[in-house]
Amino acid sequence: MIRTTLTAALIAAALASPATAEPHTYEIDQTHASIGFLVDHIGYAKLLGQFLKTEGSFVFDEETLELGEVNVTIDASSVFTNHEARDNHVRSNDFLAAGDNPDITFTATGGQIETDRTGKVTGDLTIRGVTNPVTLDVTWNKTAPYPFGHQKQTIGVSARGSILRSDYDMTYAQGGIVGDEVDLIIEVEAIVTE
């Protein structure tokens, strides 16, 4: 298993719950997962957008901090910027090319724990069928049984990073109209499934 992958860096920085002495499978809770982005718009302000459909799972051992079988997929067509015409444009070949490339994926390749609550993760991010490395700064927020509803062990993490959209062949409206740098905003809860 990969010692530090996308979710490892997001959660393995500091799990405070008692060790389980065996690996467990966790699944991202789509109802409590926010995958967002900020990009400059003509210098006036940064536009905030998000993806409404995200799924992923991983296997994690709390005692050894080993994690593997990580799969994270974002539905490119689920992009939402609070403006229907703009959302359709972002889905087009000028940006995400969601028709030909419906999935945005991340596969982690490594990482580093920095403190008992923070770390970094590196991995391969694929958008529009183009794959590039990316580094995320991650913070572990909490691990505990959920207080209501399913009441299963739940892990909460935050991550931040940035990419250049030109690295993914998205050069439309560059030169002061739409910024090249895109800030990534990730807030995720994941629930133990077995």
Image (cartoon, grey):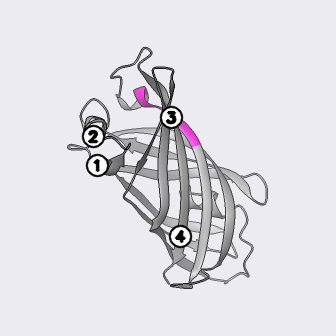
Tell me residue 90's x, y (percent).
Answer: 31, 36
- Where is residue 54 shown, x and y percent of the image? 40, 59
Kindly identify the residue that appears in the image at 41 percent across and 19 percent down: 177
Of the residues tagged 4 and 2, which is closer to the observer? 2
In the rendered view, does 157 fall on the left or right side of 26? right
Residue at image mark 4: 190
Q: Which residues are magenta?
A: 161-166
Give the main secondary structure of the magenta stretch: strand
Residue 191 drawn above or below residue 183? below
- Depth check: 57 or 3 in front? 57
Numbered mark located on residue 163 in the image:
3
Does residue 175 belong to the magenta stretch? Answer: no
Question: Closer to the N terminus: mark 1 or mark 3?
Answer: 1
Inter-mark Cα distance, 2 to 3:
18 Å
Q: How many marks?
A: 4
User: In this view, which residue lies farthest toward the top?
Assistant: 175
Q: CA distance from mark 4 to mark 2?
A: 27 Å
Where residue 169 appears, as percent x and y from the top left, is 34, 28
Tell me which label, 3 or 4, sits earlier in the chain: 3
Q: Looking at the picture, does residue 65 appear above or below residue 77?
A: below
- Badge 1 crowding class, 10 Å Cα cut-off, few under 14, some 14 to 19, many 20 or more, is many
Disc ID at residue 91:
2
Which amino acid type corresponds to the residue marked 2 in the rendered image?
Arg
Viewer can see residue 1? no
Three-letter amino acid code of the residue under disc 3: Ile
